[in-house]
Image: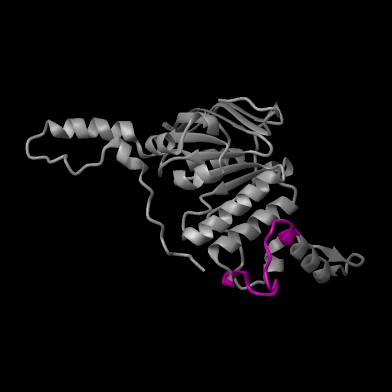
Amino acid sequence: MTTSDTAPLVELRGAGKSYGNIRALHGVDLAVHPGKVTCVLGDNGAGKSTLIKIISGLHQHTEGQFLVDGTPVRFGTPREALDRGIAAVYQDLATVPLMPVWRNFFLGSELTRGPWPVRRLDIPRMKETADRELREMGIVLDDLEQPIGTLSGGQRQCVAIARAVHFGARVLILDEPTAALGVKQSGVVLKYIAAARDRGLGVIFITHNPHHAYMVGDHFSVLRLGTLELSAARSEVGLEELTNHMAGGAELAALKHELAQVRGVDVAGLPEADDLTAPVPGSTEGKS
Protein backbone atom coordinates (compact mmCIF):
# COMPACT_ATOMS: atom_id res chain seq x y z
CA MET A 1 0.00 0.00 0.00
CA THR A 2 1.42 3.32 -1.03
CA THR A 3 1.97 6.22 1.29
CA SER A 4 0.51 9.68 1.01
CA ASP A 5 1.53 13.14 2.12
CA THR A 6 -1.47 13.18 4.46
CA ALA A 7 -2.48 10.81 7.23
CA PRO A 8 -5.42 8.54 6.35
CA LEU A 9 -8.88 9.55 7.48
CA VAL A 10 -9.91 5.91 7.68
CA GLU A 11 -7.69 2.85 7.83
CA LEU A 12 -8.20 -0.90 8.05
CA ARG A 13 -5.28 -3.04 9.21
CA GLY A 14 -5.71 -6.76 8.73
CA ALA A 15 -9.45 -6.30 9.20
CA GLY A 16 -11.89 -9.15 8.95
CA LYS A 17 -15.43 -10.17 9.72
CA SER A 18 -16.85 -13.59 10.52
CA TYR A 19 -20.48 -14.61 10.82
CA GLY A 20 -20.30 -17.69 12.98
CA ASN A 21 -18.07 -20.13 11.11
CA ILE A 22 -18.31 -18.15 7.89
CA ARG A 23 -15.42 -15.77 7.27
CA ALA A 24 -16.71 -13.01 4.98
CA LEU A 25 -13.63 -10.79 5.13
CA HIS A 26 -10.07 -11.60 6.18
CA GLY A 27 -6.80 -9.69 6.47
CA VAL A 28 -7.86 -6.59 4.54
CA ASP A 29 -5.68 -3.46 4.57
CA LEU A 30 -7.20 -0.23 3.30
CA ALA A 31 -6.31 3.45 3.71
CA VAL A 32 -8.53 6.37 2.69
CA HIS A 33 -6.82 9.75 2.37
CA PRO A 34 -8.38 13.21 2.05
CA GLY A 35 -8.71 14.39 -1.53
CA LYS A 36 -8.28 10.86 -2.90
CA VAL A 37 -10.63 8.28 -4.44
CA THR A 38 -10.04 4.74 -3.19
CA CYS A 39 -11.74 2.23 -5.49
CA VAL A 40 -12.79 -1.13 -4.07
CA LEU A 41 -13.55 -3.64 -6.79
CA GLY A 42 -14.83 -7.18 -6.72
CA ASP A 43 -17.51 -9.53 -7.97
CA ASN A 44 -20.62 -10.48 -6.03
CA GLY A 45 -19.57 -12.24 -2.84
CA ALA A 46 -16.09 -10.70 -2.86
CA GLY A 47 -16.65 -8.93 0.46
CA LYS A 48 -17.41 -5.40 -0.71
CA SER A 49 -20.70 -5.14 1.20
CA THR A 50 -19.11 -6.43 4.40
CA LEU A 51 -16.34 -3.85 4.11
CA ILE A 52 -18.89 -1.05 3.65
CA LYS A 53 -20.86 -2.21 6.67
CA ILE A 54 -17.78 -2.19 8.91
CA ILE A 55 -16.72 1.32 7.92
CA SER A 56 -20.25 2.76 8.04
CA GLY A 57 -21.01 1.31 11.48
CA LEU A 58 -23.58 -1.32 10.50
CA HIS A 59 -21.34 -4.21 11.56
CA GLN A 60 -18.28 -4.53 13.78
CA HIS A 61 -15.05 -6.13 12.62
CA THR A 62 -14.06 -9.36 14.35
CA GLU A 63 -10.34 -9.26 13.55
CA GLY A 64 -7.69 -6.65 12.87
CA GLN A 65 -8.01 -2.91 13.46
CA PHE A 66 -10.29 -0.14 12.22
CA LEU A 67 -8.88 3.37 12.73
CA VAL A 68 -10.37 6.83 12.21
CA ASP A 69 -7.88 9.71 12.30
CA GLY A 70 -5.31 7.26 13.64
CA THR A 71 -7.45 6.16 16.60
CA PRO A 72 -8.84 2.60 16.86
CA VAL A 73 -12.64 2.57 16.79
CA ARG A 74 -15.46 0.07 16.94
CA PHE A 75 -18.72 1.69 15.89
CA GLY A 76 -21.93 0.36 17.39
CA THR A 77 -24.30 2.21 15.07
CA PRO A 78 -24.23 4.14 11.78
CA ARG A 79 -24.91 7.31 13.79
CA GLU A 80 -21.52 6.91 15.47
CA ALA A 81 -19.89 6.72 12.04
CA LEU A 82 -21.81 9.79 10.86
CA ASP A 83 -20.67 11.68 13.94
CA ARG A 84 -17.08 10.98 12.85
CA GLY A 85 -17.80 12.25 9.33
CA ILE A 86 -18.33 8.92 7.56
CA ALA A 87 -21.38 8.87 5.26
CA ALA A 88 -22.58 6.10 2.96
CA VAL A 89 -24.64 6.55 -0.20
CA TYR A 90 -26.18 3.22 -1.12
CA GLN A 91 -27.26 1.94 -4.51
CA ASP A 92 -30.90 1.83 -3.36
CA LEU A 93 -31.06 5.46 -2.30
CA ALA A 94 -33.11 6.29 0.80
CA THR A 95 -35.34 8.89 -0.84
CA VAL A 96 -39.07 9.55 -0.91
CA PRO A 97 -39.89 9.67 -4.65
CA LEU A 98 -42.98 11.90 -4.37
CA MET A 99 -41.32 14.51 -2.16
CA PRO A 100 -39.56 17.49 -3.78
CA VAL A 101 -35.80 17.60 -4.22
CA TRP A 102 -35.23 20.14 -1.43
CA ARG A 103 -37.30 18.08 1.01
CA ASN A 104 -35.26 14.95 0.30
CA PHE A 105 -32.06 16.96 0.68
CA PHE A 106 -32.98 17.63 4.34
CA LEU A 107 -34.87 14.38 4.98
CA GLY A 108 -34.45 13.53 8.67
CA SER A 109 -32.45 16.71 9.34
CA GLU A 110 -35.02 19.42 8.64
CA LEU A 111 -34.35 23.05 9.55
CA THR A 112 -36.92 24.66 11.84
CA ARG A 113 -37.69 28.12 13.20
CA GLY A 114 -39.79 29.74 15.89
CA PRO A 115 -40.02 29.19 19.65
CA TRP A 116 -40.63 25.81 21.26
CA PRO A 117 -43.20 24.14 21.29
CA VAL A 118 -44.56 25.75 18.12
CA ARG A 119 -41.47 25.42 15.96
CA ARG A 120 -42.18 24.89 12.27
CA LEU A 121 -40.23 23.93 9.19
CA ASP A 122 -38.05 26.69 7.80
CA ILE A 123 -38.95 25.99 4.19
CA PRO A 124 -37.38 29.10 2.59
CA ARG A 125 -34.01 28.44 4.24
CA MET A 126 -34.06 24.76 3.28
CA LYS A 127 -34.80 25.62 -0.36
CA GLU A 128 -32.10 28.28 -0.43
CA THR A 129 -29.53 26.01 1.22
CA ALA A 130 -30.31 23.02 -1.01
CA ASP A 131 -30.04 25.16 -4.15
CA ARG A 132 -26.73 26.69 -3.02
CA GLU A 133 -25.14 23.38 -2.02
CA LEU A 134 -26.20 21.66 -5.23
CA ARG A 135 -24.82 24.52 -7.33
CA GLU A 136 -21.52 24.47 -5.45
CA MET A 137 -21.18 20.84 -6.49
CA GLY A 138 -22.02 21.84 -10.06
CA ILE A 139 -25.53 20.38 -9.93
CA VAL A 140 -28.05 22.75 -11.50
CA LEU A 141 -31.71 21.73 -11.38
CA ASP A 142 -34.43 23.83 -12.97
CA ASP A 143 -36.94 23.23 -10.20
CA LEU A 144 -36.22 22.03 -6.66
CA GLU A 145 -39.98 21.57 -6.21
CA GLN A 146 -40.05 18.67 -8.64
CA PRO A 147 -40.42 15.22 -7.03
CA ILE A 148 -37.03 13.59 -6.71
CA GLY A 149 -38.49 10.49 -8.33
CA THR A 150 -38.68 12.41 -11.63
CA LEU A 151 -34.90 12.83 -11.72
CA SER A 152 -32.68 10.36 -13.52
CA GLY A 153 -30.78 7.78 -11.50
CA GLY A 154 -27.57 9.72 -12.01
CA GLN A 155 -29.12 12.98 -10.83
CA ARG A 156 -30.49 11.31 -7.67
CA GLN A 157 -27.03 9.93 -6.91
CA CYS A 158 -25.56 13.41 -7.32
CA VAL A 159 -28.14 14.95 -4.97
CA ALA A 160 -27.24 12.30 -2.39
CA ILE A 161 -23.53 13.12 -2.75
CA ALA A 162 -24.17 16.85 -2.31
CA ARG A 163 -26.35 16.12 0.73
CA ALA A 164 -23.59 14.08 2.39
CA VAL A 165 -21.06 16.85 1.75
CA HIS A 166 -23.38 19.48 3.22
CA PHE A 167 -23.91 17.51 6.41
CA GLY A 168 -20.21 17.29 7.11
CA ALA A 169 -19.00 14.08 5.50
CA ARG A 170 -15.22 13.75 5.41
CA VAL A 171 -15.33 10.19 4.12
CA LEU A 172 -17.91 9.36 1.46
CA ILE A 173 -18.73 5.71 0.73
CA LEU A 174 -20.44 5.19 -2.64
CA ASP A 175 -21.95 1.74 -3.11
CA GLU A 176 -22.10 0.84 -6.82
CA PRO A 177 -23.37 4.32 -7.82
CA THR A 178 -23.10 3.59 -11.56
CA ALA A 179 -24.35 -0.02 -11.52
CA ALA A 180 -27.83 0.57 -12.97
CA LEU A 181 -26.95 3.58 -15.13
CA GLY A 182 -26.27 4.03 -18.82
CA VAL A 183 -23.11 5.57 -20.24
CA LYS A 184 -24.29 9.18 -20.09
CA GLN A 185 -25.61 9.06 -16.53
CA SER A 186 -22.57 7.11 -15.34
CA GLY A 187 -20.44 9.94 -16.66
CA VAL A 188 -22.49 12.44 -14.66
CA VAL A 189 -21.96 10.49 -11.44
CA LEU A 190 -18.23 10.07 -12.07
CA LYS A 191 -17.97 13.83 -12.58
CA TYR A 192 -19.42 14.48 -9.12
CA ILE A 193 -17.24 11.82 -7.52
CA ALA A 194 -14.28 13.82 -8.84
CA ALA A 195 -15.90 17.02 -7.52
CA ALA A 196 -16.21 15.50 -4.03
CA ARG A 197 -12.55 14.46 -4.17
CA ASP A 198 -11.52 17.95 -5.26
CA ARG A 199 -13.32 19.38 -2.21
CA GLY A 200 -10.98 17.35 -0.01
CA LEU A 201 -13.18 14.38 0.85
CA GLY A 202 -11.84 10.87 1.07
CA VAL A 203 -14.02 8.84 -1.31
CA ILE A 204 -14.51 5.07 -1.22
CA PHE A 205 -15.90 4.06 -4.61
CA ILE A 206 -17.33 0.54 -4.53
CA THR A 207 -17.75 -0.88 -8.02
CA HIS A 208 -17.44 -3.96 -10.20
CA ASN A 209 -16.58 -1.85 -13.26
CA PRO A 210 -12.82 -1.32 -13.66
CA HIS A 211 -13.32 1.17 -16.49
CA HIS A 212 -15.37 3.47 -14.26
CA ALA A 213 -12.93 3.00 -11.39
CA TYR A 214 -9.91 3.89 -13.50
CA MET A 215 -11.49 7.15 -14.69
CA VAL A 216 -11.51 8.67 -11.19
CA GLY A 217 -9.47 6.39 -8.93
CA ASP A 218 -6.23 7.20 -7.12
CA HIS A 219 -5.84 3.81 -5.42
CA PHE A 220 -7.32 0.42 -6.30
CA SER A 221 -8.13 -2.52 -4.04
CA VAL A 222 -9.50 -5.71 -5.57
CA LEU A 223 -11.30 -8.16 -3.29
CA ARG A 224 -11.78 -11.82 -4.09
CA LEU A 225 -13.63 -14.22 -1.79
CA GLY A 226 -13.12 -11.93 1.20
CA THR A 227 -9.39 -11.36 0.80
CA LEU A 228 -7.34 -8.59 -0.80
CA GLU A 229 -6.04 -9.72 -4.18
CA LEU A 230 -4.59 -6.38 -5.29
CA SER A 231 -3.75 -3.08 -3.61
CA ALA A 232 -2.05 -0.56 -5.88
CA ALA A 233 -1.79 3.15 -6.54
CA ARG A 234 -2.75 4.48 -9.95
CA SER A 235 0.93 4.87 -10.85
CA GLU A 236 1.49 1.17 -10.12
CA VAL A 237 -1.29 -0.44 -12.16
CA GLY A 238 -2.80 0.10 -15.59
CA LEU A 239 -6.38 -0.46 -16.67
CA GLU A 240 -5.44 -3.67 -18.45
CA GLU A 241 -3.88 -5.23 -15.34
CA LEU A 242 -6.68 -3.95 -13.12
CA THR A 243 -9.30 -5.49 -15.40
CA ASN A 244 -7.38 -8.75 -15.49
CA HIS A 245 -7.34 -8.95 -11.68
CA MET A 246 -11.00 -8.05 -11.51
CA ALA A 247 -12.02 -10.63 -14.10
CA GLY A 248 -9.90 -13.41 -12.60
CA GLY A 249 -7.54 -13.82 -15.53
CA ALA A 250 -5.28 -16.28 -13.69
CA GLU A 251 -8.25 -18.42 -12.67
CA LEU A 252 -9.58 -18.42 -16.23
CA ALA A 253 -6.20 -19.52 -17.60
CA ALA A 254 -6.06 -22.38 -15.08
CA LEU A 255 -9.63 -23.41 -15.91
CA LYS A 256 -8.89 -23.37 -19.62
CA HIS A 257 -5.83 -25.58 -19.06
CA GLU A 258 -7.88 -28.07 -17.02
CA LEU A 259 -10.70 -28.20 -19.55
CA ALA A 260 -8.23 -28.75 -22.37
CA GLN A 261 -7.40 -32.12 -20.78
CA VAL A 262 -11.03 -33.25 -20.90
CA ARG A 263 -12.13 -35.16 -23.98
CA GLY A 264 -14.96 -33.52 -25.89
CA VAL A 265 -14.53 -30.07 -24.40
CA ASP A 266 -13.69 -27.33 -26.91
CA VAL A 267 -11.76 -24.50 -25.23
CA ALA A 268 -11.01 -22.64 -28.44
CA GLY A 269 -13.92 -20.28 -27.85
CA LEU A 270 -12.90 -19.31 -24.35
CA PRO A 271 -11.22 -15.89 -24.10
CA GLU A 272 -7.59 -15.55 -23.21
CA ALA A 273 -6.70 -13.60 -20.07
CA ASP A 274 -5.60 -10.66 -22.25
CA ASP A 275 -9.02 -10.58 -23.90
CA LEU A 276 -10.67 -9.75 -20.58
CA THR A 277 -9.65 -6.11 -20.96
CA ALA A 278 -12.04 -5.43 -23.82
CA PRO A 279 -14.52 -2.67 -22.92
CA VAL A 280 -17.96 -3.83 -21.90
CA PRO A 281 -20.63 -2.40 -24.23
CA GLY A 282 -22.49 0.39 -22.45
CA SER A 283 -26.11 -0.17 -21.50
CA THR A 284 -28.66 2.38 -22.61
CA GLU A 285 -30.68 1.88 -19.44
CA GLY A 286 -31.04 4.98 -17.33
CA LYS A 287 -30.03 7.46 -20.03
CA SER A 288 -31.71 10.83 -20.06
Quadrant of residue 147 within the rendered picture: bottom right
Prevailing SS of the magenta stretch? loop
Task: Confirm whether the magenta stretch covers residue 169.
Answer: no
Q: Residue extending furthest right? A: 115
The answer to whether residue 168 is visible is yes
69 vs 182, left or right, is right
Q: Quadrant of the N terminus?
A: top right
Residue name at image x 26 percent, y 32 percent: 253
Q: Which residues are magenta?
A: 133-150
Count of numbered tags? 0
Color theme of the render:
one colour
Residue name at image x 73 percent, y 43 percent: 83
The answer to whether residue 94 is visible is no
Residue 286: x %, y % from top left: 48, 65
Residue 56: x %, y % from top left: 61, 42
Quadrant of residue 97 within the rendered picture: bottom right
Q: Residue extending furthest left? A: 263
Residue name at image x 54 percent, y 34 percent: 234
Residue name at image x 46 percent, y 38 percent: 47
193 relative to 268, above or below: below
Task: Confirm whether the magenta stretch covers residue 142.
Answer: yes
Residue 244: x %, y % from top left: 37, 36
Quadrant of residue 208 within the rendered picture: top left
Residue 149: x %, y % from top left: 58, 70
